[in-house]
Structure formats: C-alpha cells, structure tokens
C-alpha cells in the first residue's frame, strides 16, 4: 500500500540519493558479512601448497583439493565429537522443547490460581540469577555430573525468554477452541497436544531451531564439566584446533613434508564441516521466525 | 442492563463468600492435570535457578565444599572487602566498563539503524537477500568466530595482507594489542549479531499503522521526515525496553567469547569481572571469594536494571514492570 502510493509521487533528488546510498550500503554489508564465510569455504577446498603461497583475497579455491575434508573425516577426534554433539543436540533439544512447551502452555491458561506468582518467580530469574559459581558447584558437586552428558543437557533446559515467546503464542490461540475440545471430553494434556500444538507449529519450529543451535554451538559447559575426551562435543575439539592451534593429531599421519600447509586447509575444512549444517537448515525456517516469534516477543 | 448488573453483583457476592481454602481446593480439583504438567518446570526452576541463588550465600562464607553451606564458617563481608582491596578490582571494573560501554555506544544502535535502512529498501527480494545473509553469522558458534578472527588477523592472514597491500606498512598483530581488544570484541559482535538484532525492530515496524505514512505523504512529508516522525517513534517502545534490558547487563561482558579471545598479551584490557570469576572459581577453586565477586556483579546489574526501569517509567510510559 505504502509502496504503491509512493511510486505515484515523484521522488526528490535527495530521496533518490538516499536510495542509491542505501543500496550501496547494503551491498557493502552483504560483502562484509558473506565474504569471510566464502573465503573459509574457498580456502578449505584449496590445494594446501598453492594456498600457502597465496596472499590476499580468494575469488575461487586455489587449485582444487578435497584432501582436507578427507583428513577431517579420517580424524577420530572429530568423528567422536560429531557423534557426541548429535547426541547432546537431540537429547537436549527434546528436553528443552518439552519443558518449555509444558511451562508455556500451563502459564497461558485462564483460571489457574497460582499462575501469577509462579510466572513472577520464573521471570525474576531473567533479571537475577545465582551466577556461575553456585551453579557450577550444584552441577559438579551436589549432583555429581562431572563427566556426565546430563551436565550439558539439563541445567540450561528452559530459556525463560523462549518460554515467554511460546506463552504469548498460546495466549493468541482463541480460547473457544479449548472450550470446544473440553466439551468433546478432552483433558488439558490432550488440548495441548491435539489442538494447540498443531496451531503454533511455526513457533514450535523456531523453538526447536533456537535450542538445537544453542546445543550445537555450546562449548562452555563441556569445558567445565567434562574431563573425558571421549565425551567432548565438536566445539571443544574445534577450540583445540582453531584457537589453541593443536592440529598435531591431524598432521602426524601426513607423510609429505608440507605438514603445516595441510594443517591450514584442515582448519578451514573443519570450520565448514561444523558450521555448514546449521547454515543450510536455517534459511528454511527463516520465514517462521520473523513472523511467529518476534511479534510474540514484543507483545510478551 | 439492570439485570446484567444484578447478576454480576450476585456473582461477585458469591465469589466473596468463598473461603480461600475452598478456592484452593476447587482450583486444585479443576486444574490438577495442569499442575502436574507444570511440575517438571517448577522443579527445573527450583533446582537450577533458585538453588544457585540460595547457593550464592557462600559469598559470605569461607566455603569448603566438603563441609557444604551448613558446615562452612561464616565470614560476613570478608570476601567482598578482599575483592574491593585487591589489585584486580580497579582493573576489572575499568575493563568491564570499557568493553560494555563501547558495545552500548556502537553495538546497541547498529541493529536499529539496519532495521530502519532495511525498511526503506524498495525491492522485496533484495531485502530478503540482505536479511538472509546478515542473519547467518548469528548461527556460527563463538568458537568458530574467534577462530576466524585469529586466522584473519594473523601476521600473514587475510586482514594483514589486505592492509599491507593497500595501505602499506607493517602487519598489525590485532589479537595481541591490548588497546585494540575492546574494539575487536565489539566489532566482531556487531558483525555476528547486527542482522539478527534487527529482526525485533523490523517486527515492530510492521505493527505501525500504514495510514500514518499515507497521511504524512498527503501532508508532504518526505522519506526522512517519515522515518524521523513515524517509524522511529513507532519502534521507540521496543527500543526503550531493549535498552533497559541492555543496561541491566552493563556489568556483564560475555566471558565465553573472552576466554577464547584473550591471551597473556591482551590480559591487561581483556580481563573482565566474569572471566575473573571463572578463573578464580573454576580454575583455582576459590569458591567463596569468586561467588562474592559474582554476587557483587549480579547485584549491580539488578540495581542498574531497576533504576533504568524506574527512570523510564517516570519519563515516558514504557517500562518492563
């Protein structure tokens, strides 16, 4: 409507100037945002020797070699990390989404006596928390979850902000639907599963995405609670390779003299292998999170 | 009308006659299943949120994990005064505030500006392209982000190559310069989150009544005047809410990224309260003391949040509560 009307009016030169400037800005923004990721991809597919000699921007891979990827997938640390991460993501996301849904649903119902005080106590934790050390002592000493996947899955199970977003989505479903289902003899749990969840599918999809990405990318709980390398998630292995610069375990097998060069492309290939799955999934959910979630977030 | 009021009056009388205990019993009979569904959620919050709040009492103890909270000796504010008098206190406060305020000045407005500019793009597909691409870095893990920074800023990395090729001079070891640390931290944060942060403002813009723009155009307002007088005021409540929340974390700088980014050379500007808590508490197992530092931090944050909220409520009418 707004755009229609605007095209009928003549644009002043300053507005035209603004439009072109804006366009230019956006193009620069796209390059600044996208090129670093593209560079990593090109570098990972490059021939290690050529890449080591090259300085500056890459517009295509230098030569072409999937050697680094082969090396990444031959590496037992990365494979174990992959397996562990998948376990933590699936287990964690399941618990997160179930708990968040239950909480959001009950706290969105009418005529629940204790709802307000409970909601207050939940929201309060967004603004004041016990902090790192008491939580660490609880999980590692009182619960004894050192070297346990539970330490990575349970303590952050509900993000209060997500719960509020979902609660808003439930509130927006017309109440008559619940009444109708109740008349047909459904109990509250059936109302949730059979009536409400199908209606808020977009929000549910976004919750799954948020929690899954959170688990996929998380490294800190693993860093403080896990000692056993066989339990390490991908991000911890990645930290050793990228930041502590220990590609040792990967290059020992290299028979050629160019150990260091191989390590560089292996680094890039590892980044791609760890990051690409998420970057490929998220655009499919993009339309949901703009629509469903954030409007809920504002009102909530 | 009169009858409706009479019924209403009767209902109110009946409600008033119900005793609290009856109310609780009736609520329980009707909502038993709902409460059962809520039980795991309540347990989660009790155990993982409220037990640690109770656990932060160790800040007032010379805490010994073997003896627990009940068995450890109380020392009053000793841990706090130790921290205030320690060599680190001034440095940590200064570093935390430097990074946090730089982020407030650069990082907070960035997504607002992006949202306003995105809203002015006329061609839908291009707008969606910009959005898709700028949201992407949000999904990259902090380990990879810091890994990319380390790689790009290395001596023969991408940044330095471009820098020496275009400007000339010697390569700059960005990650080893203490004076550059806050800027690197904030700019990489903007790179990662500016697109994602703009979503909430874009959503707020969609709730603005389109007839306002039409009326403004009829009155001869140009695009800048429309942005200034319609779009910006339209998203102002959202901006204020997010600003209040942001002020409530003034003293918290994400330690996850910093413990990946810092090294002995940048420690002088990179060490912040949260990383200090991590080192003292988890690496050195000085629990009572580190819990005190953490509690000090939480209390300041909570106070700032409350003050910002009160101020906003008094000045405008937007507030969190």
Image (spheres, rainbow, N blue to C red):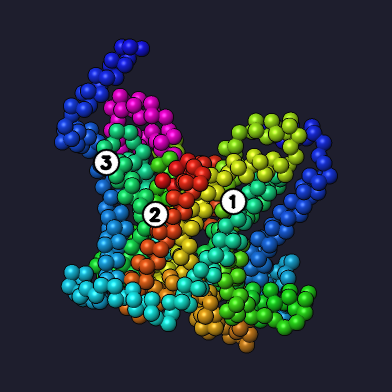
Where is residue A37? Give x, y as percent. Answer: 64, 64
Give the residue number, with chain letter if any, for mark 1: B198
Question: For residue A176: magenta?
Answer: yes
| Local secondary structure at mark 1 | helix
Q: Are marks 1 and 3 on the same chain?
A: no
User: Image check: B281 left or right of A63?
Assistant: left
> Is A198 contained in the magenta span?
no
Q: Residue furthest right?
A: A13
User: Which of the numbered marks, if any, corresponds to residue B60?
Assistant: none
Residue at 61% from the left image edge and 61% from the top image edge: B106
Disc 1 to disc 2, C-alpha distance: 22 Å
> Which residue of the protein is positioned furthest toward the bottom in this rendering?
A257
**Of helix, strand and loop, which one carries label 2?**
helix
Image: magenta residue range: A169-196
| Helix, strand or loop at mark 3 | loop
Quickly name the residue at label 3: A114
Judged by depth in the image, the label closer to the viewer, 1 or 2, is 2
Q: Is residue B86 left or right of residue A286?
A: left
Give me the chain letter of mark 3.
Answer: A
Left/right of residue A150 with respect to residue B147 in the rendered view: left
Q: Which residue does the image show at 61% across and 83% down from the upper left?
A: A260
Closest to the observer: B227 or B128?
B227
Q: Which chain is home to disc 1?
A: B
Q: Which residue is mark 2?
A: A126
Place of residue A75 in the rendered image (x, y in percent of width and height, measured from the top left): 50, 74
> Could you tell me residue A103's position as x and y percent?
34, 45
How many numbered marks, from 0 up?
3
Q: Is residue A212 above or below residue B287?
A: above
The answer to which quarter of the image holds residue A266 is bottom right
């Amino acid at each position: 409507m707004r755009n229609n009307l605007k095209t009928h009016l003549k644009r002043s030169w300053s507005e035209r100037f603004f439009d072109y400037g804006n366009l230019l800005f956006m193009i620069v923004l796209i390059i600044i945002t996208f090129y670093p990721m593209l560079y990593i991809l090109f570098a990972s597919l490059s021939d290690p020797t050529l890449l080591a000699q090259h300085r500056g921007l890459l517009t295509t891979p230098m030569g072409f070699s999937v050697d680094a990827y082969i090396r990444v997938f031959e590496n037992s640390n990365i494979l174990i990390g992959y397996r562990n991460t998948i376990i933590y993501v699936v287990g964690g996301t399941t618990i997160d989404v179930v708990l968040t849904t239950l909480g959001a649903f009950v706290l969105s119902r009418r005529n629940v006596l204790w709802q307000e005080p409970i909601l207050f106590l939940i929201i309060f934790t967004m603004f004041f928390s016990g902090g790192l050390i008491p939580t660490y002592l609880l999980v590692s000493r009182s619960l004894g979850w050192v070297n346990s996947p539970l330490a990575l899955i349970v303590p952050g199970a509900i993000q209060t902000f997500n719960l509020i977003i979902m609660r808003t989505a439930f509130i927006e479903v017309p109440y008559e639907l619940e009444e109708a289902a109740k008349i047909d003899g459904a109990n509250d749990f059936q109302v949730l599963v059979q009536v409400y969840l199908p209606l808020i599918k977009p929000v549910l999809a976004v919750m799954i995405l948020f929690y899954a990405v959170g688990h996929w990318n998380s490294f800190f709980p693993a860093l403080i609670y896990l000692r056993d390398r066989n339990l390490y998630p991908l991000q911890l292995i990645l930290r050793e390779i990228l930041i502590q610069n220990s590609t040792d375990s990967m290059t020992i097998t290299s028979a050629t003299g160019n150990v260091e060069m191989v390590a560089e492309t292996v680094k890039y290939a590892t980044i791609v292998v760890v990051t690409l799955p998420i970057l490929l999934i998220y655009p499919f959910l993009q339309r949901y999170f703009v629509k469903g979630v954030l409007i809920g977030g504002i009102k909530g | 009308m009169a009858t409706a009021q009479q019924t209403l009056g009767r209902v109110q009388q009946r409600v008033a006659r119900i005793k609290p205990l009856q109310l609780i019993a009736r609520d329980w009979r009707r909502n038993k299943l709902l409460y059962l569904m809520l039980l795991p959620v309540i347990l989660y919050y009790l155990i993982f949120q409220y037990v640690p709040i109770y656990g932060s009492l160790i800040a007032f103890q010379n805490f010994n994990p073997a003896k627990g909270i009940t068995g450890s000796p109380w020392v009053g504010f000793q841990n706090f005064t130790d921290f205030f008098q320690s060599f680190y206190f001034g440095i940590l406060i200064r570093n935390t505030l430097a990074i946090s305020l730089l982020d407030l000045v650069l990082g907070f407005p960035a997504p607002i500006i992006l949202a306003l500019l995105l809203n002015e793009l006329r061609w839908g597909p291009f707008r969606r392209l910009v959005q898709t691409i700028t949201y992407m870095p949000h999904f990259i893990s902090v380990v990879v982000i810091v890994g990319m920074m380390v790689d790009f800023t290395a001596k023969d990395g991408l940044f330095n190559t471009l820098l020496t090729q275009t400007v000339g001079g010697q390569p700059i070891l960005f990650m080893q310069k203490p004076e550059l640390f806050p800027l690197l931290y904030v700019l990489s944060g903007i790179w990662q989150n500016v697109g994602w942060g703009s979503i909430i403002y874009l959503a707020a813009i969609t709730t603005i009544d389109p007839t306002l723009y039409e009326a403004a155009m009829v009155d001869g307002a140009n695009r800048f005047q429309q942005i200034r007088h319609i779009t910006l005021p339209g998203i102002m409540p959202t901006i204020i809410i997010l600003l209040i929340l942001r002020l409530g974390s003034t003293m918290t700088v994400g330690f996850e990224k910093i413990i990946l980014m810092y090294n002995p050379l940048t420690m002088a500007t990179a060490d912040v309260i949260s990383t200090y808590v991590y080192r003292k508490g988890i690496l050195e197992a000085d629990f009572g003391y580190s819990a005190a530092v953490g509690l000090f931090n939480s209390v300041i944050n909570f106070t700032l949040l409350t003050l910002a909220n009160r101020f906003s409520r008094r000045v405008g009418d937007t507030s969190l509560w």
